[in-house]
Image: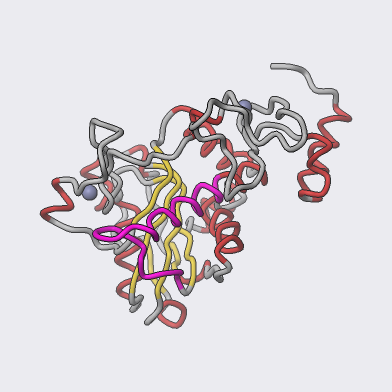
Amino acid sequence: MRVVPACLADVAALAGRLGRALLPLCDRCQVCRGLLPGAGGGGGAGAGSWHGGIGGKKSPVCPVCAPGLAPRCGGFCPRCGAFAVDADAPPELCLDCRHGGRVWDGFAFHGRYEGLLRELVLGFKFSGRLGQGRLLAGFLAEAWQRAAGRHGPGSMDAGAPDCLVPVPLHPRRLSWRGFNQSLELARLLGRELARPVCPAGLLRVRDTIPQSRLPGRKRLTNLAGAFTGQARLVAGRHVLLIDDVMTTGATVETAVRALRQAGAARVDVTVVAR
Ligand SMILES: [Zn+2]
Ligand SMILES: [Zn+2]
């Protein structure tokens, strides 16, 4: 890794805080921190490949990183995001969704939790860098739009939600980590979709063992009673639940059940990675 003089690091930190106005002074790839191609660059990856620009904006990712962050557009279940072997196959319901169904309504995700996307999600979780958050929220917005434009199982064709609710952290975990990445993503996405964020719509009332330390079959029982929905905030409303990653789906399932118990009329789910 290249050593960046302290004064330059300070300039980068300051630019991050002051927002887009200063960014051209130190435009860096939000994944590898390499310098982005010249002003107005917008990528430069091969024709037809995803270049990282969100909603037509200039890409915050360099041409080397962009292809590793392309959205998954085929070979997945539209109801839960489970992957098929062929990444180019049209979206098709998986066996579980064909038989059991899911507790949520619409579902959207950006890509597979591996490689660069995984690095980016973990980087944001532990650094909280605003640029990374913006990039991930852009992924959420695009995923949501793709699902809103689709029809059939798992689609978001009910339109924009009444409010966005992030998967909460238990207060003890929150004070240890300092911020809830799902809340930050929901805030950025809420701005993008012009919808309010309602962090108190779902509370984590019981601290649990981190899901990543448990085998799949124990994850649902670990979460029993972990969340409670706030009826005064979500009853009768169309809620969009936001999380960074969904692996087995146990956390999201438990959270959606709590929102439903509190009377939410419809619950869609959007996550960055699956
Ligand atoms: Zn890069
Ligand atoms: Zn499925």
Q: Position of residue 18 (x, y in %)?
A: 81, 50
Between 243 and 82, the one nearer to me in the picture: 82
Q: Is residue 120 magenta?
A: no
Residue extending farthest left = 99
Q: Nearer the viewer, residue 221 or 263?
A: 263
The answer to which of 125 and 103 lies nearer the viewer is 103
Q: Residue at x 58, y 46 (%)?
A: 54
Q: How is the image coloured?
A: secondary structure
How many numbered circles does the render carry?
Answer: 0
Q: Residue at (62%, 28%) from the top-left corner?
A: 44
Q: Residue at x 49, y 32 (%)?
A: 48
Residue 39 to residue 197: above or below: above
Picture quarter with the C terminus: top left
Occupied quadrant, residue 24: top right
Is 155 covered by the magenta stretch? yes
Q: Residue 92, image x and y in percent?
A: 21, 46
Q: Give the image quarter of residue 71.
A: top left
Q: Is residue 147 left or right of residue 187?
A: left
As drawn, the residue found furthest toward the right would be: 7
Q: Tell which residue pokes out farthest to the front in this image.
A: 47
Side of 22 where 142 appears, left or right? left
Image quarter where the N terminus lies is top right
Q: Where residue 115 sits: x, y (%)?
A: 45, 27
- Span highlighted in magenta in the image: 136-161
**Residue 256 in the image: x percent, y percent?**
33, 64
